[in-house]
Image (tube, grey):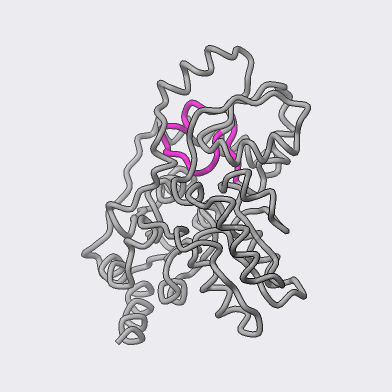
């Protein structure tokens, strides 16, 4: 049955000129029918070069918004209308403007996991893999990093010469993991390397053998000579890696690392969207696109 639906999706996306982008946290059966899979920014860049007129983002809302910002001429669909991101949505432009006023001359650095509205009031965007390099290149010595204070603290640890300001924000899933779980997991799997996303708490990342983005974690695991890994990010990554590297063992660091928003989109949602009877079209006004594009362009200029 699954294969039948997948084959119909493959037929319909070609017939209806749809490019399917699937975030790495989505189900494996969705990745199998996607044109591209990866993290949010990489997918947005892929959308720019895709020849199709319609782009279906199988992920969450801020990702679809980023696609629209970079490809405003395309029709952009989100696979499930309720798929949001609590971290991306937890701050408002007004809050950021008021906080900026308290730190004159600071650079406002926005994690890519932010809404289009938030991006309009920021100076530069970063990804988890590019954040350290980009912030280091900024001329400003004072940084307001939003929204994830855990990723911000990780960046700060690499650039101690700059002054950082944070607001209380972050990924509610990654921050659920505590140090005692890490120690217990390492006890159960003493030969496994621990690979952790920087959205986790500092008490977790300090035990890691590698700290990096989702793409970085996957690349590290594939290239490593080690045969066992504890995966400290959304547990679907452990599943995907087990398909890609059947000779290795992958263990989710915690059963708490399950993103409900990413799990909302099903293969049936993808089918309905490419068939023209599902998904939500993303609309952004020209001013929002222009202002939000500014901080993304700054990221690209700085090598992000």
Depth check: give the residue in front, 43 or 157: 157
Q: Residue 55, can we see it?
A: no
Depth check: give the residue in front, 104 or 52: 104
| Residue 82, percent from left and from top | 28, 52
Image quarter in which the N terminus is found:
bottom left
Depth check: give the residue in front, 138 or 28: 28
Left or right: residue 225 versus residue 264 is: right
Image quarter in which the C terminus is found:
top right
- Residue 119 is covered by the magenta coloring: yes
Depth check: give the residue in front, 100 or 124: 100
Q: Is residue 168 above or below residue 45?
A: above
The residue depicted at 58 percent of the width and 59 percent of the height is 232
The residue depicted at 52 percent of the width and 57 percent of the height is 43
Q: Residue furthest left?
A: 277
| Residue 56, percent from left and from top | 38, 60
Q: Which residues are magenta?
A: 110-127
The residue depicted at 42 percent of the width and 70 percent of the height is 27
Number of numbered discs: 0
| Residue 32, percent from left and from top | 46, 77
Q: Is residue 91 above or below residue 44?
A: above
Q: Is residue 85 above or below residue 103?
A: below
Q: Is residue 43 above or below residue 202?
A: below
| Residue 269, percent from left and from top | 28, 67
The residue depicted at 31 percent of the width and 68 percent of the height is 274
Quadrant hosting residue 88: top left
Q: Residue 140, can we see it?
A: yes
Left or right: residue 264 versus residue 238 is: left
């Amino acid at each position: 049955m699954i294969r039948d639906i997948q084959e119909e999706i493959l037929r319909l996306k070609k017939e209806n000129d749809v490019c399917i982008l699937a975030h790495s946290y989505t189900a494996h059966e969705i990745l199998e029918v996607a044109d591209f899979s990866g993290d949010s920014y990489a997918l947005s860049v892929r959308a720019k070069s895709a020849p199709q007129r319609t782009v279906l983002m199988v992920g969450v809302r801020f990702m679809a918004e980023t696609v629209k910002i970079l490809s405003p001429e395309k029709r952009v669909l989100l696979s499930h209308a309720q798929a949001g991101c609590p971290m991306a949505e937890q701050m408002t432009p007004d809050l950021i403007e008021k906080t900026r006023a308290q730190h004159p001359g600071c650079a406002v650095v926005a994690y890519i996991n932010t809404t289009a509205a938030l991006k309009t009031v920021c100076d530069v965007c970063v990804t988890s893999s590019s954040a350290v390099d980009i912030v280091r290149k900024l001329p400003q010595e004072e940084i307001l990093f939003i929204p994830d204070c855990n990723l911000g603290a990780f960046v700060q640890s690499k650039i101690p010469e700059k002054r950082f300001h944070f607001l209380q924000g972050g990924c509610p899933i990654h921050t659920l993991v505590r140090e005692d779980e890490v120690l217990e997991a390492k006890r159960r799997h003493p030969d496994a390397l621990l690979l952790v996303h920087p959205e986790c708490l500092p008490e977790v990342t300090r035990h890691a053998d590698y700290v990096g983005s989702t793409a970085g974690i996957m690349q590290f695991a594939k290239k490593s000579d080690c045969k066992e890994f504890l995966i400290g990010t959304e547990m679907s990554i452990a599943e995907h890696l087990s398909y890609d590297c059947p000779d290795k063992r992958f263990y989710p660091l915690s059963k708490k690392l399950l993103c409900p928003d990413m799990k909302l989109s099903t293969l049936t949602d993808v089918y309905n969207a490419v068939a023209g009877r599902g998904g939500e079209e993303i609309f952004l006004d020209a001013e929002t696109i222009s202002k939000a594009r500014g901080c993304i362009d700054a990221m690209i200029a700085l090598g992000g």
